[in-house]
Image (spheres, helix red, strand yellow):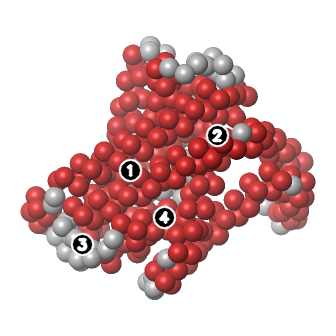
Amino acid sequence: MLKKYKKSFSMAFIILSALVMLVILFKDDDLFNLFEIINKINKVYIIIALAFIFIFWLLEAAMIYLLITKFTEHKRGLGTFWLAVKVTMIGQYYSNITPLASGGQPVQLYVLKDSDISLSNGTAILISKFLLFQIGVTIYSLLLAVYKIKLLTNINNGASAFIITGLTINTVMLSAIVLIAFNQQVLLKLCSFFLNLLYKLHIVKDVNKLMNKTERFISEYKDSISKLKEDYSYTTKMFVITVIQITVFFSITYFVYKSFNLNESNIIDIICLQSFLYMAVSFIPTPGTAGASEIGFVLLLGHLFPSNIISTALLLWRGISFYFSLVFSGLFSFAVTTLSKKKIAFL
């Protein structure tokens, strides 16, 4: 019952955020002006942007497929790939409707278990996928920040602190992953220190319980990292796919930009700004980072668009990158669970 209330609250929050966004964006514009702008956009670029969403999902499914065949007895073939597609799309839906995308992995684990993949192997698959993406997107964004340092320092509208905070949090996470891989004891000591500090500040009550959970968490990640370290050729291939996947997703903003027949900015600059935006909002605890993504888009990418079309640009970008993904993955999840006549417990 509580899960249903949480899901309903998340959906209500997303819908409310969308309505508030529309009201704020178009409070000074009539709908006729909106339709007039949309009618003038280059539809080819919108189709490309939508196609890139599907390519992003396809690459996600390909990685899960490769992890399944690597960590389990499942053979390569259409059956295993279809399982990877289901894991991808159902995971997308639940990640979209839960804070910090926290609902995706539990449901994905359920789908894997339903296909006779053990909890330990399923956990290893999902943790490995998370590690590959998290390491990839953090290094990707840090390299772009160094390469485009001038672009980063020229952002003077208050967004710099936003970006630096996001990069810092992701860098701390990357450092934790490195410690898990090479010096687990140092990380455990750091966790123990901070948990005891929080206990003294009366923020946490049971340090031992939290420390036990932390140790189990670190142990699971250690096992997954060890599996990836066993085959550097395989892991390198997976990182290459991850980089392509990240680039595809961040390029969607560029095609939205081009749909307005704008040419002043290049794809590298827009991908760079989009990566900063992703870093800045990825740890905002709202379903689908609703609210933060819209504000971040205006702060970081708003200057690329003429003032009279920024609202429409935001609507198109968010509509393609989030709301289309939410609706499509939701319909997919409903169709798959209905046709299989086996309702997922989280639905």
Q: CA distance from mark 1 to mark 3?
A: 25 Å
Residue corresponding to mark 4:
275
Determine whether the residue tagged by mark 3 lies in a helix, strand or loop: loop
Tell me if label 4 and label 3 are in contact, CB under 8 Å.
no
- Among numbered discs 1 and 2, the one appearing first in the sequence: 2
Neighbourhood count class around disc 3 (C-alpha, 10 Å): few under 14, some 14–19, many 20 upward: few
| Residue 234 image label | 2
228 relative to 282, above or below: above
Residue type marked 3: Asn
Residue identifier under label 1: 322
Q: Quadrant of residue 219?
A: top right
Residue 134: assigned label: none
Image coords of residue 331 (percent x, y): 35, 31
Whether pointer 2 and pointer 3 mark residues with C-beta atoms closer than 8 Å, the reply is no
Helix, strand or loop for disc 4 = helix
* Placement of 317 over or under 230, stated as above or below: below
Q: Of helix, strand and loop, which one carries label 2?
A: helix
Q: CA distance from mark 1 to mark 2?
A: 31 Å
Name the disc covering residue 263, or none.
3
N-terminal-most mark, 2 or 3: 2
Please tell me which of labels 4 and 3 falls first in the chain: 3
User: Marks 1 and 4, Cα distance to the nearest angstrom?
Assistant: 16 Å
Dot in front, 2 or 3: 2
Q: Is residue 317 visible?
A: yes
Q: Amino acid at mark 1?
A: Phe
Q: Nearer the viewer, residue 236 or 146?
A: 236
9 relative to 197 in the view: left or right: left
